[in-house]
């Protein structure tokens, strides 16, 4: 694709090299982003809004470091491919120093250290800022890998209990009530639904005040089109033919569009590229093949443009914004387990969990195909794919420290699995959408061509459900790699496997309760 036009907006345009890799993208507002690649198809550099980013990779293609201006981010991985450490380093005046005095030494801005239990779930997260301020966060998990408590510096800050379907029944302060699988009460808030399970009204009682009432309306495609807030404003949303939100605007009490509130959105596939409100445009870039954001630029017309590097957590949620020209932190965030975020500092970002955008007018997160409420850890509508992706069509993935849902459709498991000989095998790629397999129970995910660590003939991986029969015994499920012909292959050599005799035919998934 070389050009994409949505409605009457200017085109989004692309250029490619001789082997089909994107080299230039021109946005409708005139912003140009360019990429440079190595022979293995890995990004070496990215230039956007006058800033150049460089990337380093390990032998299996994982990003181990990236740098922009005076800021560098270094990542270390475990033998199983999990993120073990992330160091954010300031290199003041490191690229050019014409003065008499030497450049200031590198400064450690932030270090995140992660520890996991044997099945891959996160259990410890240590954060050290400016080599002084330290925070230790640990996670208590049940046998299914769901987090029952978040403990910070020895004190529980969040506590949860669940029913068999993964619905939160108790969040420490308020108990929740359900009608079937629908949340109907959370403390002082009641929820009301239409006949197909879409949230249409939310009412919160307040002592000595009238209740706060929210109203929600949808179109025939289950897309949220209108929200009326307790203080009066009426917000309206529109979408393109691919289901992506293209505009948001506020209506006055007479039903007329308040043009000053109009916000337009530009997409690059399923990645939000730009938002434009009046003369202010905000742009984002992302790590290649991922929903992890790298930069945020804010162009305010006559005002000097702002440009920030985005530091993210384990799954790609923004936690800090840094000015790469000075390596100064301008804002940092605190996020609870299910995504409710508080920013501190001179600015912030609307980006939340991978693929999510925060709407301040509603407190909801737009998640492409659905809207997510971080206060309840639930979506407003049922999963458009039904029960195929998950037994619970209303909830976010069961453990948000390792699982994501960037499209609002399918929970995405961790991106690597352990092979028969301890290999770290790339599996489900960030943002990949699984489709139900035609035999057995499980989901099939695409594998990008020339994925480092896999034979180039591998085109997909199947993540199968647990099965125990006289012939097969995989109590925690198993993975199957396939080629374009649908044949099971050894993911490292690309050769077709022969039944259970080859340990790569069915790769057992780990015990969630070691």
Image (tube, helix red, strand yellow):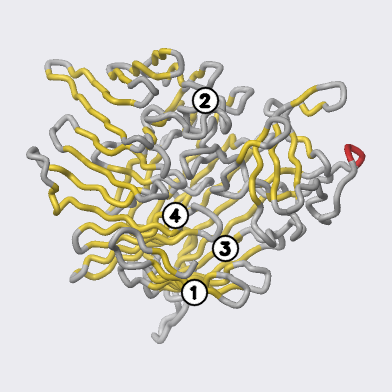
Dot in front, 1 or 4: 1
State if disc 2 and disc 4 touch (CB < 8 Å). no
Q: Is residue 479 above or below residue 21?
A: above
| Residue picked out by circle 1 | 15
Secondary structure beneath disc 2?
loop
- Looking at the image, tell me whether mark 1 or mark 3 is earlier in sequence order: 1
* Mark 1 vs mark 3: in front: 1
Q: Earlier in the sequence, mark 1 or mark 2?
A: 1
Q: Which residue is mark 2?
A: 392
Residue at the spot of label 3? 65
Kind of element beneath mark 4: strand
Q: Is residue 394 above or below residue 357?
A: above
Q: Residue at x 42, y 41 (%)?
A: 369
Residue 110 screen position, x and y as percent: 47, 54
Density class for disc 2 (Cα within 10 Å; few <14, some 14-19, many ≥20) is some
x then y, percent, for residue 82: 64, 47
Of the numbered discs in the image, which one, if any, rests on residue 483?
none
Question: How far, Cα to Cα, is label 3 from label 2?
Answer: 37 Å
> Callout 3: few (<14), some (14-19), or many (20+) C-alpha neighbours within 10 Å?
some
Q: CA distance from mark 4 to mark 2?
A: 26 Å
Earlier in the chain: of badge 4 and badge 3, it is 3
Does label 4 or label 2 sit earlier along the sequence? 4
The answer to whether one can see residue 377 in this image is yes
Residue 301 position, x and y percent, is 21, 69
């Amino acid at each position: 694709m070389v050009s994409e036009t949505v409605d009457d907006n200017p085109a989004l345009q692309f250029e490619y090299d001789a082997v089909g890799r994107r080299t230039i993208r021109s946005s409708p507002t005139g912003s140009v982003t360019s990429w440079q690649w190595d022979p293995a198809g890995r990004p070496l550099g990215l230039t956007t809004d006058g800033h150049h980013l460089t990337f380093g990779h390990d032998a299996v293609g994982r990003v181990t470091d990236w740098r922009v201006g005076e800021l560098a981010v270094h990542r270390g991985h475990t033998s199983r491919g999990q993120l073990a450490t992330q160091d954010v380093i300031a290199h003041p005046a490191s690229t050019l120093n014409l003065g008499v005095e030497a450049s200031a030494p590198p400064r450690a801005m932030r270090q995140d250290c992660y520890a996991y239990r044997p099945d891959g779930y996160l259990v410890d997260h240590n954060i050290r800022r400016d080599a002084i301020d330290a925070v230790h966060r640990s996670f208590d998990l049940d046998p299914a890998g769901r987090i029952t408590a978040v403990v910070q510096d020895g004190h529980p800050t969040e506590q949860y209990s669940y029913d068999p379907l993964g619905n939160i029944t108790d969040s420490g302060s308020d108990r929740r009530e359900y009608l079937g699988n629908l949340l109907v009460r959370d403390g002082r808030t009641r929820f009301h639904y239409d006949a197909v399970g879409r949230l249409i009204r939310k009412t919160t009682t307040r002592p000595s005040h009238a209740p706060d009432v929210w109203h929600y309306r949808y179109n025939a495609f289950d897309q949220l089109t209108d929200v009326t807030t307790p203080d009066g404003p009426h917000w309206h949303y529109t979408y393109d033919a691919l289901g992506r939100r293209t505009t948001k605007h506020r209506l006055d009490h007479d039903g007329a569009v308040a043009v000053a509130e109009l916000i337009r959105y530009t997409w690059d596939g399923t990645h939000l590229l730009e938002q434009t409100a009046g003369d202010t445009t905000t742009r984002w870039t992302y790590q290649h093949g991922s929903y992890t954001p790298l930069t945020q630029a804010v162009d305010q017309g006559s005002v000097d443009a702002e440009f920030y590097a985005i530091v993210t957590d384990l799954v790609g949620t923004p936690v800090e914004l840094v000015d790469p020209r000075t390596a100064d932190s301008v804002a940092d965030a605190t996020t609870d387990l299910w995504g409710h975020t508080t920013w501190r500092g001179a600015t912030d970002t609307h980006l939340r969990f991978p693929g999510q955008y925060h709407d301040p007018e509603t407190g909801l997160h737009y998640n492409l195909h659905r809207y997510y409420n971080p206060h309840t850890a639930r979506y407003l509508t049922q999963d458009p794919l039904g029960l195929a992706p998950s037994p619970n069509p209303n909830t976010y993935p069961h453990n948000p420290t390792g699982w994501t849902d960037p499209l609002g459709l399918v929970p995405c498991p961790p991106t690597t699995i352990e092979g028969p000989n301890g290999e770290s095998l790339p599996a489900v790629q960030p943002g990949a959408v699984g489709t139900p397999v035609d035999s057995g129970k499980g989901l099939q995910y695409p594998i990008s061509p020339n994925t480092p660590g896999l034979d180039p003939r591998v085109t997909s991986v199947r993540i199968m459900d647990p099965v125990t029969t006289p012939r097969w015994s995989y109590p925690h499920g198993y993975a199957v790699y396939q080629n374009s012909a649908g044949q099971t292959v050894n993911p490292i050599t690309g050769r077709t496997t022969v039944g259970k005799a080859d340990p790569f035919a069915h790769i057992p998934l780990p015990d969630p309760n070691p």
